[in-house]
Amino acid sequence: MEELNIAPSKIEIEALKNVVINIGGIEEEEEEWETMGPTPMPGIADLRNWDYKLLERYKPFYAPYCEMCCFCTFGKCDLTGGKKGACGLGMAAQQARFVTIACLIGCSAHTAHGRHLLRKVLKIVGDREINMGTGINIEAPLTRLITGIKPEKLSDFIPVLEYLEEQIAQLLDSTHTGQEGSNLDYESKAYHAGMLDSLGKEVADLIQIVAFDLPKGDPDAPLVEIGMGCVDESKPVILVIGHNVVPSVAVMDYMSDHGLDERIEVAGICCTAIDTTRYSQKAKIVGSIGRQLRFVRSGVADVIMVDEQCIRADILEQAKRIHAPLIATNDKALYGLVDRTNDSVDDIVAILTSGKEPGVVILDPVKAGEVAVRVVQITHEKRKELVNILTDEEFKEYVTMCQNCDANCIVACPQGLPIGEANKAAAKGDTAPLASLFDPCVGCGRCEQVCKKHIPIVDVILKASLPYVKSEKGMIRVGRGPVLDTEIRKVGAPLVLGTIPGIIAIVGCGNYPNGTKDVYRIAKEFAERKYIVVLTGCGAMDAALYRDKDGKTLYEKYPGDFDGGCVLNIGSCVSNAHIHGAAIKVAAIYARRNIRGNYAEIADYILNRVGACGVAWGAMSQKAASIASGVNRIGIPVVIGPHGWKYRRAYLGRKYVDEDWVVYDARDGSKVQIEPAPEHMLVAADTYQEAIPLIARLCFRPTDNSMGRQVKLTHYMDLSMKYLGVYPDDWHIFVRGEADLPLARKEEYLRILKEEHGWGIDLEAKKILSGPVRKMDVGFDATNLEELIKKNE
Amino acid sequence: MTKKEDVKTTRHTGKTIDTTRHATPFDTGNIPGPKTARAVMPAVSGKILARAQRPLLIVGSQIHDKEILERVVTIGRRGIQIAAAGNAYKSLTDQKELDVHQVNMHALAAYLCDPSWHGLDKKGNYDLVAFFGITYYYASQIIATLKNFSKIKVISIDKYYHPNANISFGNLKNDIFTAALDEVIAQLPKVKKNF
């Protein structure tokens, strides 16, 4: 089509007759709100230089979970012993390829979630303006950073989603047979997927915040009940499971419009639960993914409504077992059910309440909401006589049947729990060992499938732990959403200087090595030590289940501000984009760095200055893989629990290799030997006792001032002594001078430096004469990027 | 093949100490590939450990039980350096005569794969790693790394069958496990050896 150039002039429209004018689109001139950086909407290779900087220091480290490749018909290929597959790919690259695919799955889940939300909310609420309130000017830090777009209304996310979808397709293509051959370049691609994931999460959460008026960074967001014991079984109960809140919002709206708020319980599992309570505090949270099977089996739910992600694939079978109708509301999880989207509500209600069909698909969320509310009132009455918990007689019969053969259930259990021994004790009348399995059990049900006696082991454990289950009632502050710009102004300096010793970001799933209490312990320890503790997703929920001696949960005891000694529930999985956002805002607001399309510089800033550490203690899903990769690319290390090794790849520093720890001083381009700070990018710990000092260690940054380093060293050494019974063997390498030493133990530490590490120490003058890697320099402007050296400007 | 003369019995219960039985992955899906550990009797493990030039014993968060801890200490007293992963160190703090180092096992595995690493005692890398008392799946993954990315020989003297090791015991009951550890210890030098 030829382009029509019309010079600015007066056009007489009246003169035009019988002319049809089609305008394809109007390009508005964008306000020049910030100078565009070098990498707006980066492609696969655009941030490769930054990735390689990270990968040179934090070497990818592989723990093959499977030593073969079965992706194509050349295979299966045996990759052990240095062998390559038929396509030429070796073990390291195959592991990296697998991680890239996992990150892409996770990234796709968040991005597709955002796309789905946008489509639905544009229909339901229209194209709303993005107004995050007076405390937030940087409304979408990741969107600005990665795409260079400053979104002003919901539809401004359309080009952001188009960018994401294109990049995901390009990355997925790279994993095809006969594409990438380098493990390092696959790692760069995994980082890219992780970064895209962070952007997809921000888009998704901002859409739902704006569309449904969820809290916009409210430190005093209300408290709601959480736990398997908080649901009132005397009322009809709708159980919502998943991560996409739109149908649950429709449920709450329909109830509200029809005066049913107090007559029906809406309880949720996983992030849909968190997001529903952000919308309406009438809803309750059952808990995280680990509670899913157990709560469903308890039979409390009269209707189960699912949306997307982290739903049991056999949810239909489980729903049938308790005679609760299932409503599937998202085309990503349809379970073979009939699509009734276009049927009348009356017809669908009749189908579900008569039991003609065990469940239906309803892809119109508003209709699904109405159906759920109408159906639950009927099914509740019908289900009143049903008993889903085992009777005492059934329980006794089952535990007595168990031969404690140990051959199958323990081996099938991901945690290796001693089920047989516990059954044996229960058969003799002691149910305590069985009840003690409730929390460490991840609720997968693999044990039942292999039991030779067909004992419903999940039900048996549930029965034994019923008193605990009924009393499981915590309190959680509803997801507050982003960190306010005003909060960043307050904490920016102490964070960068280190006097607020760190941001501890507890995120992710519920695949814990030893139950939910570990995340409570970790959060409590760091809150008491005045770190900023932020939580999202399953971690945020599980930390809310426990109370201190005064009966207070973490969210009741600690304020919800973004400040030292506070505990914040940021929100659901997609909300953890706001944790990236907070770090980016430190660079933008405190350091006045331009963030627009300027990813590498901001990541470099965060790596060297912002003492933050992610903790994904129960990381399980592919989303957790992409979340961690995204956090890592922006310069924040992550500690994972022992199951996290199964992701196959970590990023580990070698503190004993000096050349790995050299950075530039941006003032003059000189090279500076630094301490290993942070030492690793992605590392697993075995127990919470090991994790806690490790997390404290990963909060060190090269730019800590002496006061900040003192604070961080104090915690690192205290925590190591408290949990491991020993001072860490590497604490001395973080000491740059006597001013870095904690005052209370300065003499003791100087003596250790002299006697155990051979440093030159003047004990009388309390001075360090020789030994440190470098001296403290208040003006040190650490960077890993040559282009940021000022003399080059 | 287990030789008849190698088979011993537990001291108190008289059960046969055959550590080659039940040699299937303790975590049922943990089938890594075509190459899996050979199940051996404890004397074999003990002899290999005793012959190593630079052995390292890695223990983890499952050693706090008195019976197990005693055996960790005994092996350490025979001169084998110990890497205490997880929170194992907490139970070893009073054992001043042992050469024990608190480690993060993930980082340790990476270091072990680096031939230029100077070791926990600055005397160089190791030629053999033995381990037990570590969370099963956690241990399994570390040795998957050593199996595929190092030349270090890995022997599992754990209660569970570890397919990624060079040699391993099968899945054992507690009494057989402690008896097997005693058989391993019996092969070590009676006096402290400087490895």
Image (cartoon, coloured by chain):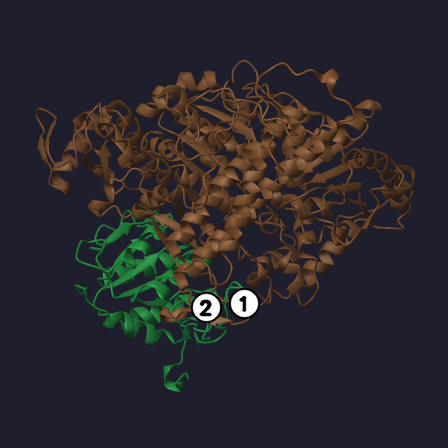
Residue at coordinates 66% horizontally, 47% vertically from top-left?
A311
Residue at coordinates 72% horizontally, 50% vertically from top-left?
A315
**Kind of residue indicated by mark 1:** Cys
- The residue where tag 2 is placed is A87
- Foreground pick, A544 / A704: A704
Q: Please, which chain is the residue tagged with disc 1 on?
A: A
In the image, which disc is placed on residue A723? Answer: none
- The residue where tag 1 is placed is A72
Q: Position of residue B155 (x, y in %)?
A: 35, 68
Q: Quadrant of the C terminus of chain A?
A: top left
Q: Position of residue A414 (x, y in %)?
A: 55, 56
Q: Which hue is chain B drawn in? A: green
Q: Quadrant of the N terminus of chain A?
A: top right
In the rendered image of this protein, does residue A84 appear above or below residue A182? below
- Looking at the image, residue A643 sits to the left or right of residue A672; the answer is right
Task: Give the SS element for disc 2.
Answer: loop
- Looking at the image, residue A152 sits to the left or right of residue A462; the answer is left
- Looking at the image, residue A585 sits to the left or right of residue A706; the answer is right
**Which of the 4 image quarters holds residue A298?**
top right
Q: Residue furthest bottom?
A: B4
Disc 2 crowd rating (10 Å Cα; few below 14, some 14-19, many 20+) is: some
- Looking at the image, residue A409 sits to the left or right of residue A22; the answer is left
Q: Mark 1 or mark 2: name the one nearer the start of the chain.
A: 1
Task: Give the SS element for disc 1.
Answer: loop
The mark tally for this picture is 2
Q: Position of residue A29 (x, y in %)?
A: 54, 22
Mark 1–mark 2 Cα distance, whole angstroms, equals 9 Å
**Kind of residue indicated by mark 2:** Cys
Disc 1 crowd rating (10 Å Cα; few below 14, some 14-19, many 20+) is: few
